[in-house]
Image: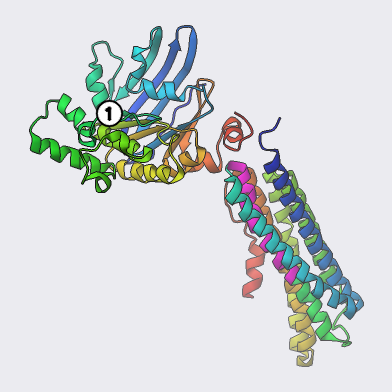
Amino acid sequence: MSITNSLHSGIKQKITVENLNFFYGDNHALSDISIVIGDRQITALIGPSGCGKSTFLRCLNRMNDTIPGIRAEGRVLLDGQDIYTPGTNVVDLRQRVGMVFQRPNSFPQSVFDNVAFGPRVLGLHRSQSLAASVEESLRGAALWDEVKDALGQDALSLSLGQQQRLCIARAIAIKPEVILMDEPCSALDPIDTLQIEELMRELKKNYCIVIVTHNMQQAARVSDWTGFFWLGELVEFDATQTIFTHPNQKLTENYITGRAG
Amino acid sequence: MSTRSAFDQELQELRVSVLRMGSMVDTAIGRSLQSLKERDQSLARQVIAEDEDINELRFKVEGDCVRLIARQQPAARDLRFIVAVMNIVPDLERMGDHAAGIATIVVRMGDEPLLKPLIDLPRMAQIAREMLRASLDAFVSENDEQEAMAITIRDEEVDQLYHQIFRELITFMIEDPRTVTRAMYLLFCAHNVERIADRVTNICERVAFVATGRMQEISSEAGTEVGII
């Protein structure tokens, strides 16, 4: 099944995926996915476990490349440039397309060093500008007020919700254009979850956000667009309010109402 | 095994509650007309008293809807269905009020003879009741937009009959102003029936919404004309 979607007028295309097929060896994990993802929008990907949504997310910054035996066909255009073109600098790509994972993966270092890690790798060493970058990123991740007096403390001593926001701060410290989030709240309690969602609404003013979530209410609450994956296919992609009030596909309806999946 | 049998069961209970309420309203309309025809004041009082049961059921069903939304976070068709129910039960409740309105007039008229024999009014009420039952059938079958829309066409028959009664009673009042009170009694009764049929079209709109997700007004031109004569 191949579907194409169109964004509302006035929304810039950030990522355009054309007929993407993805294989883990003989396993055809994604079939002919075509999708247009808008800039400064939150796009949620939903579907049951094993439907390919995380695989798809990881195709957007080539995080699957390290897995042996994989093969990707089709095109993934970031601002019109195919990221699978041979010779693409994958490190540059991942600087532009950052990622936040399911469990916070703070480094066993200070809060400051966690956030300063990316900028340092990119060659920022002057302490004043580094401090400014760390502050800006922590503010952007709505964590500054909670950690500003203890930037030297071990990041692992923060609560899980704080650590997840720290990971978001670390991701935005290198000024990406796209932030991919793979179930960023699945390890968090409801309050931390709502804080992350609130943060996502702030972040979308400046970034293109794509989130994979098992929590359909989260997709309904936070996203502008929702894509529903099923057995490696994109069954439906539409404005979130359409998906949750009158989806076009029976399969989508059955999944979001708990009749299937 | 279904992953949502408890939710399905609760939705079914909601469906049954709406049908029960619809049946109570249908009975109330029938009895109010019967009390008018037979000048049966005790039956009229019964209709007025039983309207309380309809009012109570309305709030119970609305409460059930709120609880389902809070606990199940319904989406898609389930959400549309629950929203439709929340819109349908106030309409049913108001239809019960219209029936009680007719009964109140019967009580108020006492033993005063009717101004004219009842011909068009029972016919109007008959059509309105048929529309109501058909709309509840469409509500249960849930996926037929056309079926729901077809019912609303009959609202024009009701409006035309109302129009006819209206002109006839105006003529009575012009010819002999002493008939004004008795003419107004009948006009109020006819107006109540006319409003009942209008509210059935609201139910049909909600049934169509469940089926399609589209919210659309079904307008009856005849109905709007009557209001401005």
Which region is colored magenta? Answer: B76-97
Q: Nearer the viewer, residue A182 or B122?
A: A182
Q: What is the quadrant of residue B201 in the picture?
A: bottom right
Q: Residue furthest bottom?
A: B178
Q: Nearer the viewer, residue A249 or B52?
A: B52
Q: What is the quadrant of residue A128 in the picture?
A: top left
Helix, strand or loop at label 1? It is loop
Q: Position of residue A219 (x, y in %)?
A: 46, 39
The quadrant of the image that shows the N terminus of chain B is top right
Q: Nearer the viewer, residue A189 or B13?
A: A189
Residue B164 vertical position relative to residue A19 in the rendered view, above or below: below
Magenta includes B84?
A: yes
Query: In the shown orientation, is residue B134 left or right of residue A63?
Result: right
**Rendered residue at 64%/48% (across/down):** B81
Query: In the shown orientation, is residue A118 left or right of residue A240?
Result: left
Count of number-bearing discs: 1
What residue would you read off at disc 1?
A: A108
